[in-house]
Image (spheres, coloured by chain):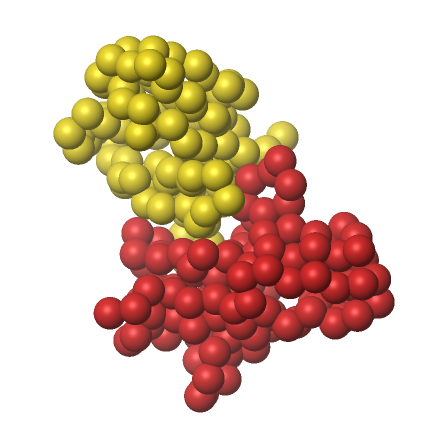
């Protein structure tokens, strides 16, 4: 059973470009969470999605950031008009149900904005 | 004030030492607590859950004191492979916050020969 998959693992963008980060949850998991880890800081919750629904986006910046988890395909975290402060590691986690104990993390996408 | 605060560290200990990490949380509504381990440039991995009755997994012992909102992790007989960043985590259960993990900033442990 493959774990949580994220791609790309590394992404370089210039200021003003768009970044699209993908997350494929573990098989059978319908709950996806995105976290961001800024350099030298702890992980911060961004958004929690179930299939086709955003459940909690309290950690998402109000502008430029959006997330989706369509019926088919991976979850996408989209950052428009990236700025240098968006450089961070973005981790996706999945769980089969609403249960904190069983959140499994993907390897992360490291975004570098030049 | 941060919701989850940990010992600043870093901790540098010799192999075989016993080391203890402390953590406090400010949200009294937090329901579940965990210790995660994160290796350099890797994803966090669940080390163990933390229960009020205390729980042990091999060389690792975790304790939770809800009254003082305090969590601890004890590592006995440290191994070189224990070197990592240890993350104290609280879960904000209830309402629409189910599933949201709140992480401390982490404590770096280095075990040397």
Quadrant housing the N terminus of chain B:
top right
What residue is shown at x 64% (from left), y 51% (from top)? A88
What residue is shown at x 32% (from left), y 45% (from top)? B46
Check the image and name the residue furthest to the bottom.
A72
Let me know if residue B97 appears in the view.
no
Above or below residue A11? Residue B81 is above
Q: Position of residue B110 (x, y in %)?
A: 42, 21
Q: Position of residue A58 (x, y in %)?
A: 61, 59
What residue is shown at x 31% (from left), y 24% (from top)? B80
**In terms of depth relative to the viewer, which is nearer, A9 or A50?**
A9
Check the image and name the residue furthest to the front.
B113
Question: What letter labels the chain drawn in yellow?
Answer: B
Q: Colour of chain A?
A: red
Q: Position of residue A17 (x, y in %)?
A: 79, 70
Image-based side of A64 in relation to A1, left or right: right
Quarter holding residue A78? bottom right
**Total numbered labels:** 0
**In terms of depth relative to the viewer, which is nearer, B36 or B71?**
B36
Quadrant housing the C terminus of chain B:
top left
**In terms of depth relative to the viewer, which is nearer, A5 or A97?**
A5
Q: Position of residue A44 (x, y in %)?
A: 57, 48
Let me know if residue B57 appears in the view.
yes
What residue is shown at x 60% (from left), y 55% (from top)? A110
Above or below residue B68? Residue B34 is below
Quarter holding residue B3? top right
């Amino acid at each position: 059973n493959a774990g949580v998959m994220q791609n790309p693992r590394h992404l370089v963008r210039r200021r003003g470009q768009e970044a699209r980060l993908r997350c494929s949850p573990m098989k059978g998991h319908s709950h996806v969470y995105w976290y961001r880890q800024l350099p030298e800081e702890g992980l911060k919750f961004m958004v929690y999605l179930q299939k086709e629904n955003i459940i909690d986006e309290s950690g998402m910046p109000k502008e430029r950031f959006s997330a989706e988890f369509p019926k088919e395909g991976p979850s996408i975290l989209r950052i428009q008009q990236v700025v240098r402060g968006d450089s961070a590691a973005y981790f996706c986690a999945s769980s089969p149900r609403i249960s904190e104990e069983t959140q499994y993390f993907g390897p992360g996408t490291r975004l570098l904005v030049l | 004030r941060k919701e989850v605060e940990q010992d600043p560290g870093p901790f540098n200990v010799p192999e075989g030492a016993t080391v203890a990490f402390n953590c406090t949380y400010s949200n009294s509504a937090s329901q579940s607590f965990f210790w995660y381990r994160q290796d350099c440039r890797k994803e966090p991995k669940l080390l163990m859950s933390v229960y009020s009755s205390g729980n042990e997994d091999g060389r690792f012992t975790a304790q939770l004191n809800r009254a003082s909102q305090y969590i601890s992790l004890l590592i006995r007989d440290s191994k070189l492979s224990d070197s990592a960043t240890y993350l104290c985590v609280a879960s904000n259960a209830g309402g629409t916050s189910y599933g949201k993990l709140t992480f401390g900033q982490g404590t770096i442990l280095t075990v040397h020969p």
